[in-house]
Image: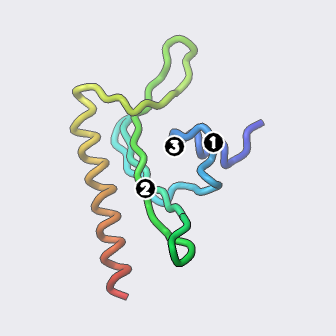
Amino acid sequence: MQTTKQIQAQKYGQEEPNTGNLPEKRFSTGAVSATVWKNIGNGKEGPVEYRTVSFQRSYKDKKDDTWKTTSSLRLHDLPKATLVLQKAYEYLVMREQAEEAF
């Protein structure tokens, strides 16, 4: 039986949970999605918070009738990829500007 974190990780295209982090924000259209992840790393002066974006396309495997993910795109996926990546970029820039205002 899978844990909730394992199910969430698979849903967002990870084999195992990313240090227990759940996605901060997800943008999707059709089978194409971009997910923003909050991460904490070690900087020179202690912990440093940063964000990363993962990208994926979901598809149903006809062999075993299961949903899978890939980072490969078809021609008709390119406009969708552009859209979700632009939304992720806007989210991160606006978030950064809001933090700097305080």
Labels 1 and 2: the sequence-earlier one: 1
Q: Residue at x 43, y 30 (%)?
A: 70
Q: Position of residue 11 (x, y in %)?
A: 55, 40
Labels 3 and 2: the sequence-earlier one: 3
Q: In the current view of this chain or complex, which residue is farthest to the top?
A: 63
User: How many angstroms separate mark 1 from mark 2 (CA)?
Assistant: 16 Å
Residue 101 sits in which quadrant?
bottom left
18 on left or right of 84? right
Q: What crowding class fits label 1: few (fewer than 14 Cα within 10 Å), some (14-19), or many (20 or more)? A: few
Q: Which residue is mark 2?
A: 52
> What's under tag 2, amino acid-wise?
Thr
Disc 1 secondary structure class: loop
1 on left or right of 21? right
Mark 3 or mark 1, which is nearer to you?
1
Residue 82 sits in which quadrant?
top left
Q: Residue at x 35, y 29 (%)?
A: 72
Q: Which residue is mark 1?
A: 16
Q: Residue at x 52, y 27 (%)?
A: 67
